[in-house]
Image (cartoon, grey):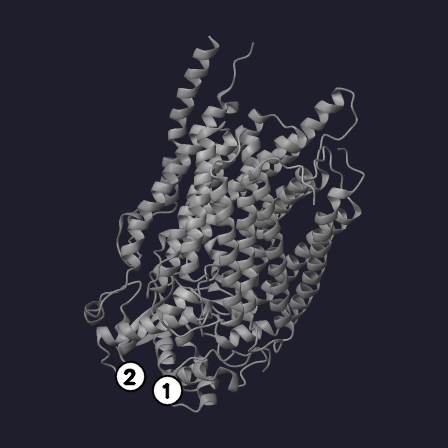
Amino acid sequence: MAKRSVWSDNRFWQRSAAWVTGFASILLIWLTFDTIPQITMGTDADLKGGVTKRVPGPTVINYKITYEMDAKRMHEIPVIGDKELFFGRDDWSEEEAGALLHLGKLGSQAKNCMDCHTLLGNGAYYAPDLTKAWLDPAWGPEGSMQAMTGKSTKEEAMAEFLQHPSTYPTHARMMPDLGITAEEAKGLVAFLKHMSSIDTNGFPRNFGRMQGAVNGK
Amino acid sequence: MFEPFVDVVPSFFGWLNQGPLTMTIFLHTIIILPMIWIYKQEKARIEKEDA
Amino acid sequence: MASSLTSESKKLATWYFTFAAIIFGAQLLFGLVAAIQYVVPGFLFELLDFSIARILHINALVVWMVFAMFGSVYWLLPDETGIETVGIGIAKLLYWIFVAAIVVVILVYLFIQVGPADQTTIWFITEGREYLEAPRWADIGIVVVALGFVFNLYATGMKGNRSGIVTVLMADMLAFAGLYLAGMGYTDNISMDQYWWWWVIHLWVEATWEVFVGAIAAYGLITMIGAHRKVVEMWLWIEVAMLFGSGILGIGHHYFWIGTPEYWWEIGALFSALEPLPLVAMFIHVLYDWGKMQGEQEAKGEAKSVITNKPAFTWFVLNAFGNFLGAGIWGFFHTLPQVNLYTHGTQFTSAHGHLAFFGAYATILIGMFYLAVQGKNGIKVMHATKKSIWATSMIVGGVVGMTIALTVAGYVQVLVSRAQMGATWAGFFDGQSGMWFAQGMDWRLVMGVITFLGFLILVVDLLSIGKNAKHER
């Protein structure tokens, strides 16, 4: 009689399944311990000292953010530059900026932003991705959105739009009025600015690089 | 084969990720390799039962 | 309706299946609303906006599947363990708590929709995190119900005969319930938020739910075609090893772009690339066992089919195909970072989502509905009716049609909005106004309507098939 093979033995596969599952779980936990400190929010001191963090602290709203090609990493990364006014100030303290971001992040959840938009590419696909919305040329000084709201700065234009989205004719698919207050809108803009400073390993690629005519328009 | 570190913050897994495929070869191997040991144990058990 | 069920556990299972089917209908209905909004943007604007329709669409999806999964376990426990489920009284009580909580959550989504930016909204209205929008009070309720369910399973498994299938389910359902905790917290850090959020979403649908499907498929093969338990359970263990071996670290493919380190590219790509393997194994396993059992039967000189429940087995075979195609192939399409950089968060993802949830989960759970109908009516061999065939064809045709339409829409979105325009506001809408995209959305709506009509026929069939005289009793 031919010998039984281990390959068709239930106990072998049961033990292998238990090992693979258990060990893969341990590896995931180990990786989590490696990743969590790297995606923990930085501090104001980091920003002042020029320490690069994957997720900068809330006071990043005091600085100009750009999205530039990094030769070494071969993709675009957010670059935190000089001081920049945000709602007329560039001296938001750690507490103030933190409170604003807290309000904005809560607002993003309370208004179900993620069920039309994508944040860091996750969410619904009915409306534009907000990962780098702060850097969108449409909201810049020459952008159509800023002109539409009649405001003179990006943050004020965004805040105005968020409070009365359905009064601005942007596209056939409009954003509904979600009862966003002036303070909440400020928080949401801070949240968007902060999100644009997160190092997303080059996602989205070529953001805002293409300007001018498309399809002959 | 080993490239300078490019990720933002140095870490064990970041270091492991320096060369082509080093990370995944390491992880796949340490998951699969001990199955050889399970195989040998079970083979011995089956032989004992059949003897 | 007279019932042939003597087991309380199986009676409870039929309650779970009934509520699951109702919520399944709600899922399709709100999906249709959202699909119409893509074609006619003003539809129900500022009454039932896309965000609300979509929350209801995807939450109803998760809820009906969880209900049907719990029901499936209550259904198979007495068969597998040989005893009545322990603590069935508590289980019935928890069922009603669960149903009540879900109804309240749905009504709040529908009529309150959004709240002010503070913690009361998170506790009582919405958490606003895709799939996990359920407010925190409901989270806690779900955890309590899940703990009761896990207790039923463990107490019964330890008291009765603990088969391989029950052992797998015990480990799997504990992880399934426990992982939910990872999605209950709040943080201001969106990267951290999404890191833990994926622990729930990914480790549910690409790990624990898939293992659950493996266990249910194993049970189905034993009960419906009389497959040999030893063979089926060996396959099950192989599937568990491959599913968890690839699926747990496969979570890395969600960590490419959320702020997490670059090393996740390599982990995510090369573990998740293996995720289709166990799905191929399941596919081979189901068809192979079927052929084998039929061959054994015919060798004995009996030309009759080995299948004791035709409509249920049809759905189980569709599961084998659908899981491999929807989760396996459509998932692999965009799992490598070089592809995902451009496809992440487009209709391509949506195409995968539709076929994967349907192929991997909806199919096998509908199969369980038919198994319950058979058991409830005391039928030995249940045949398909014209209605079951129409329902199956329309639902499958509809979902495959939607998937193709969304894939085509995703193609133009990836090329125009992403590759060319770099994902800006203007780029997004340029992509959306492309002809391929617009037509894709029209076809998706048509196919969605077909799916919904198929669902209506399915309901009629589930309610009437048991009384049909053609079955062997």
Name the kind of residue labelled 1 in the image.
Thr
Residue C429's x, y, as percent?
A: 55, 75
Residue C288's x, y, as percent?
A: 65, 31
Q: Residue furthest bottom?
A: A150
- Identify which residue, C292 or C377, lies in the foreground: C377
Name the image quarter holding the C terminus of chain A.
bottom right
The number of discs equals 2
Residue C450's x, y, as percent?
A: 72, 59
Q: Residues within 10 Å of mark 1 (few under 14, many from 20)?
A: some
Name the kind of residue labelled 2 in the image.
Leu
Label for residue A85?
2
Residue B18 visible in image? no
Q: Is residue C317 left or right of residue A47?
A: right
Label for residue A153?
1
Is residue C78 shown above or below C300?
below
Place residue C321 in its image quadrant: top right
Is residue B11 shown above or below C173?
below
Provide the chain ID for the residue under circle 1.
A
Name the image quarter holding the N terminus of chain A.
top right
Q: Residue at x 35, y 68 (%)?
A: C119
Q: Are marks 2 and 1 on the same chain?
A: yes
Asked whether disc 2 touches disc 1, contact meaning CB atoms under 8 Å apart, the reply is yes
Residue C226 visible in image? yes
In terms of sequence position, does the residue under pointer 2 or pointer 1 come before the other? 2
Q: Residue at x 59, y 72 (%)?
A: C432
Residue C150's x, y, as percent?
A: 44, 41
- Identify which residue, C188 or C339, lies in the foreground: C188
Provide the chain ID for the residue under circle 2.
A
